[in-house]
Image (cartoon, helix red, strand yellow):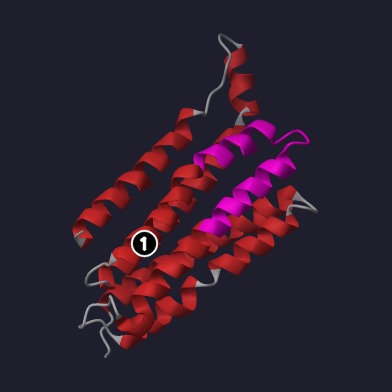
Amino acid sequence: MSKSRLETFADGVFAIAATLLIIRVSADASGRALGGALTHAWPQYAAYALSFSMIGTWWLNHHAYMEVIDHVDRTFLFLNLSLLVFVAFLPFPTHLIAEHFHDAGLRAAVIVYGITQTGAALSMGLLWSHAAKGRRLISPGVGQRIVARHTRDVWVGTPYCAAATLVALWSPYATLVIIAVAEVFYIFGGTFFLRRSATESVV
């Protein structure tokens, strides 16, 4: 399979998963009651925003890695599919969090959400590590500093998400805050890294 075909399929999954997030957002009310219903539904908006930014983060990282990969092999294809499994699954725990934000079911919902995040981070790490080992799939013209930086950064997410998931056993609200903080850090810090790595070229 060509690299471009893999990217097209992956982009489609990312786009569909992001779109599915909004389908379950609703405010069941009419007339004057609508304003109150919209206010009461704020956990749905928050869960949507968090998960949309998370899918966006995964997509940006996936794009950054594919940008320096020259070709793909069979193992890479299956590792890519393992990542997309978690991407496509994310709308489900997102809905659970929105639905159970105010009741005792939130802990279980956040744990499922955290496991999904951890699985995606682990899959992303394995995906990149397979490509980078011995530079087996890396384009010849890509600088080694870019490869080393991706290799260093890609494994941060797995222990972070795993630790955040364990925190949910104590406080699911704290887990959501931890995940949200990571997203804010990425938005304001990671975008610069992506711009810089795309133009860096050191052998």
Q: Is residue 115 magenta?
A: yes
Using residue 80 as the reference point, say whether residue 104 is left or right of it.
right
* Residue positioned most to the bottom: 203
Q: Nearer the viewer, residue 158 or 2?
A: 2
Q: Which residues are magenta?
A: 90-119
Q: Nearer the viewer, residue 137 or 193?
A: 137
- The residue under the point 77% across, 53% down is 169
Near mark 1 (Cα within 10 A), the count class, few <14, some 14-19 or many ≥20, is some
The C terminus is located in which quarter?
A: bottom left
> Quadrant of residue 44 in the image?
top right
Residue 68 pos. (x, y %): 27, 73
Residue 60 visible in the picture: no
Residue 52 pos. (x, y %): 46, 46
Q: Secondary structure at mark 1?
A: helix
Q: Is residue 168 magenta?
A: no
Residue where numbered disc 1 is placed: 62
Residue 109 visible in the picture: yes
